[in-house]
Amino acid sequence: MGQRVLRNRRTLYERDSQLAAVDEALAELTGLGTDGAAPGDRPLGALLAFAGRAGIGKTTLLAEVRRRAAAQGCTVLSARGGEQEQRVAFHVARQLLHPRLAGASEAELRASLGSWYDIVGPALGLCAPTEGAPPDQQGLRDGLDWVLTHLAVRRAPMVLVLDDAHWADPESLGWLAAFAPRAEQLPLLVVVAYRPDELPEHADAFRGLPGRAGGRPHGLEPLSADAVAGLVRESLGDHADDAFCHECWAVTAGNPFEAVELTAKVHDRGLDPTEAGAPLLRDLAAAVKGSGLIARLERLGPSAVRFAWACAVLGTEIHPALAAAVAGLGHEEAADAADALRGARVLTGAEPLEFVHPLIATAVYRAIPPATRVALHGQAAWCVTDDGQGATAAARHLLETHPEGDTWVVWQLRAAAGETLRAGAPDTARGYLARALREPPTAEERAAVLYELGSASLLTEPATTVNHLRAALQEPIAEPALRHHIVYRLSQVLAHSDRLAEASETLAREIAVTGDARVRLRMLSEQFMWDAFRADEPDHPSRSRRLARLADRLRGRDLTERYVIGLRTWDAIQRGEPADVALHHAERALAGGLGWAEADRGFEVPVLVALAFMYADRPDRTEELFAAGIADYERQGWRGGHLSFAYTLLGYVRYRRGRLAEAEDLARSGLRLAERVGPGTPAHWYALGTLIQSLLARGRTGEATRLAEDHAFREPFPAAVVFPDAQTVYGELLLARGRTEEAAAQLASAGRRLEPRGIRNPSWCPWQLHLARAQSDDAPDRALTTALDALTRARRFGAPSAIGQALRTAAEVSSGEARLAYLRESVACLERSPAAYELACALVTLGTELHDAAHLRRGLETAERCGADGLAAKARTELAATERAAL
């Protein structure tokens, strides 16, 4: 950014404590702390914040911070929020980072930023946004974190200075507020200044500071009478008497900006700084701000006034030629106006120009007559476009104009929204499109604008998205493709809002009136998918038959056909058809490619196809597909709900393989990401279910219970189908806690929900296995019937892990020779499967039953490799007892 040009370096009066904090932080940062450490031994960053009202000296203090940091060899990044630029996405982030990266070639940037190039590049103005789905906001923040972290490490020690943080754009401020507490782990000092009564809520990190910052910002108070006297004498000479200095303090209330400006006026007027001149100070002080400032401006003449207005409209980093164009002035006239405004201490600098102080800029802007201000913003939009700055630069000005039905305005706002959305700022894009809708667009364009507005709200306001998209469908739509895209997007947002029935009905209505066979197939595939996730689907068997007939006819020629075949794969898994049948369809779906980050497609089908291999005892193939899918997400910058699902389900794969510590870690990562998306979402249920199962398998029932209580993992369960099935996991938790009656009720309820839908694969949902255990004490015959029914279903599916797990359950509710036979067969099946934890359970149970030390040792070793601490402890106890009995 263009730094404010100071007339000279003034003494900073009564800022000793603030400067001491800065010096201490710089000493720590550069390795010259009070403990005597040598440079470079212990670089340590910090976050410092300075808060105070307008004119209190924040900018002057930060200028001194920059000077001292540079003098100590620090790399300095600097930015300032602007009142007129608050709605320009990433305006502050660009000021900070763009100058450090912009000099490199594209090849150098790609090499430096790696996979982050296409994600952070558009936000920082380093490259144009790519086509396709935009990065989610968390992914973009992670990318900006990466860039700043690497800069801080490569160019250490580094100082980041942000002035007027209260005026920073929301995207930049939200990112910096989240990042700033991490400065203590980096060779980075972050220094911010703001007006406390204007700081937005999403920047609360600057109000309560971490660690060594002392817990709160440093407040800046008005100057005392003695400090103002020192400032006056520094400017006007030591002959300024006490009465004059005291009156300067009285009329400015100790405000440093007003005191400096007042002394400048005294100097300009040639006023003698003595008691005799003191009565004139009040009038001079009035000219420093408010109406007095405007009256002083008007005395400079109409050209200077209009040029000042144009500068106020343009905001910061004002280029004289552009200001002249907005003001409608010729080159010489504009140059004269700029000189006059510099002489009057309204503007400073040359290329670019700046206001001497933000208070002056605000006063000038607010003094522009409303109609003239609107007209100037309109002129500014044309001028910045003509200057080649693009639609986004024009859009912030167009937001301030009145709607007039201008198609050019609509086009500019739509173009700016598209650029901004693809750069990762959906909230700003939504503001542009809402303004475009008020212009209004032509009848032919209105549906498109509503569609774009709904798309911009997709990740942040799903309910608003639904309203916009439904309104779009009510408009006349000439292009069938647009209508189809609206329907796809509407069904997606309804489904992701846990309104699966509405999503299915939306597609059904459009299928009935769509003439294009390929479009109808795409819509049918989407409907099949959302119905597959409906817990309340009214006719699952009928859908399953229709899906099977359709998938068997398709050859996988395009993505839509492969999606249908992929859904057929998942239906076979849930219904418990032979595993070979499911795998046959899975390979068909994958044959032509099934990317996880396809534009305008959900990620659900590729994930379901990958999981089919896990249930069929081929987890290596599942992990291979997950690795490729996660790489797809990260290339797109999707690090919110998408990545949460990926980590969680990868954790579930590890759980099924018996790698319990890894499963726990991945599920916790998924839960952290899911909490960014929000509680109660499907991503949250998936993560909690997987983590609870992993903790139970590790023998940490108390921890699993606390986790469930902390996150309200109980009824009501989600309307969408999630896996592991939430109600079944809850029943398993109750069973582990010894609450068998409650467990049986929950597990039986899960069965009543799944049975009518034809979901009968115990490998997918083992509700029968847990129910049999819950029934074994009070109803042993019923428990055996339940277990044997599950075993029959497992044998039909054919995966050794499913059969082995069902056999172990049958053994637990049986007795005598049948119990031993089931256990021996269970071990034999599980030895042919990847389910290491289930094998450990079967070995320990069989070894206990036979008092066989060999089986117990194998069970103990397997349990230890799995991280199943509770099972390992049990095995040790049984092994010790068996070995004692053998002596």
Image (cartoon, grey):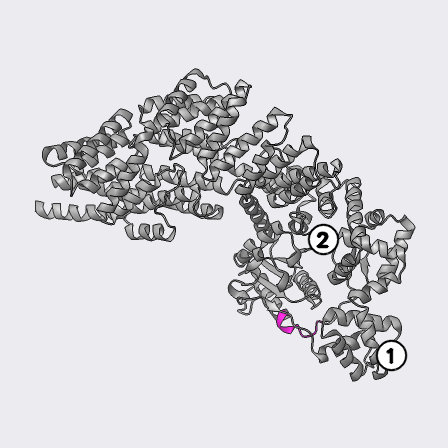
Q: Quadrant of residue 804?
A: top left
Residue at (50% x, 34% y) in the render: 492
Residue at (30% x, 30% y) in the render: 761
Circle 2/circle 1 CB separation < 8 Å: no
Measured as percent of width and height from the top left, residue 331 is found at: 89, 49
Residue at (81% x, 59% y) in the render: 347
Residue 17 is one of the magenta-drawn residues: yes
N-terminal label among 2 and 1: 2
Q: Quadrant of residue 75?
A: bottom right
Q: Is residue 874 left or right of residue 67?
A: left
- Magenta region: 12-18
Q: Nearer the viewer, residue 541 or 671?
A: 541
Question: With respect to residue 781, does 211 lie above or below?
Answer: below
Which residue is under mark 1? 272
Q: Nearer the viewer, residue 293 or 695?
A: 293
Neighbourhood count class around disc 1 (C-alpha, 10 Å): few under 14, some 14–19, many 20 upward: some
Res. 84 mark = 2
